[in-house]
Amino acid sequence: MSRPGPEFHVISLFPEMFSPASLCGVTGKAVEQGLVGLTAYQLRDFTGGSIHPVDDSPYGGGPGMLMKPEPVFAAVEQVSSTAPPGVSVLLTPQGRRFGQEAAARLADEKRVLLFCGRYEGVDERIRPLFDEELSIGDYVLSGGELAALVIIDAVTRLVPGVLGSDESTRQESFSDGRLEYPQYTRPAVFRGEAVPDVLRSGNHAEIERWRREQSERRTRARRPDLVGVDRSAGGDRGRGEEPGDD
Ligand code: SAM
């Protein structure tokens, strides 16, 4: 029986970062239950048997080392030939920004191969091996492993059956281009702050309307770029004033 989510195949110099034991919560359970697959490969195993380095200094000089093309080609070609057809991703700060849409697209794939760079980066000639290049944000990490874990997590929670209710992912931030509405749990009053009456009213139509409005208002205040309005009025920590917030 085919699994509902993709098989992730990760190539890395630190495959231990992807051991099932180190994956907790939603992702760990999804792997354990076979809803998604996860196999990590040691890049050094593709250097041809003896001790061949996986890195070398850059032509033209410059700081640090680069990942050599031979083991990367050997690893990606071998893994691609054995795994089901799918998409191969190079993780790089120079890639397209990973977001919820990309997560939804990858959740529909049978196989997602993720290649994690290290050192100062990779030899330029490995780029054509990949279908796409993804970045998780405008900052430089020491390696692609954390980026791969971010992608695995965001994709896995979209796979049917992974979260208790598919409703959870439909209502989450970014799923419809908006941020999620404010949420509360017990107690009804905490340090003088009461839960909005409407949420305790039992009137589902009213609750639904309140949530839609709050979601709209919060998105405009914090992420006007998502609704196509000027962001200049927003705060600088992603917590712009929410007009009419009480
Ligand atoms: N010198 C490279 C540059 O300026 O583009 C950065 C290399 S970085 C130190 C080493 C590796 O970490 C990269 O090859 C990539 O796999 C990974 N990495 C770093 N930042 C990343 C990001 N924002 N998103 C995805 N992967 C990233």
Image (spheres, rainbow, N blue to C red):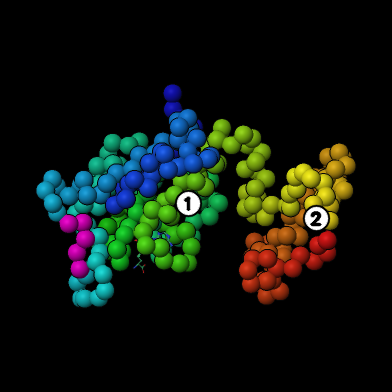
Report the predominant secondary structure element of the magenta stretch.
Answer: loop
Residue at the spot x=27%, y=39% of the render?
A: 81
In magenta stretch: residue 14:
no
Which percent across, then down, holds residue 100? 55, 51
- The amino acid type found where label 1 is placed reads Val
Q: Secondary structure at mark 1?
A: helix
Quarter containing the C terminus: bottom right
Q: What secondary structure is marked by label 2?
A: loop
Q: Which residue sits at x=17%, y=50%?
A: 47
Q: Is residue 243 above or below residue 191?
A: below
Measure the alpha-carbon separation of dots 2 and 1: 35 Å
The amino acid at mark 2 is: Arg
Using the rendered image of the protein, determine whether residue 110 is visible from the camera's viewpoint: no
Q: Which residue is mark 2?
A: 191
Along the viewing direction, whichever of 151 and 108 lies nearer the viewer: 151
**Circle 2 crowding by C-alpha within 10 Å: few under 14, some 14–19, many from 20:** few
Q: Which residue is mark 1?
A: 150
Which residue is situated farthest in the left direction here? 50
Tell me what residue is drawn at x 19 percent, y 72 percent: 59
For residue 137, side relative to residue 89 (left or right): right
Can you tell me whether the CB of the residue at mark 1 lies under 8 Å from the nearest atom of ligand 1?
no
Q: Label 1 neighbourhood size at 10 Å, few (<14), some (14-19), many (20+)? A: some
Please tell me in which quadrant of the rendered image residue 39 appears: top left
- Which of the image's four quarters has the N terminus? top left
Q: How many marks?
A: 2
Expressed as whole percent of the image width and height from the top left, the position of residue 6 reads: 44, 38
The location of residue 207, given as percent across then percent down, is: 82, 45
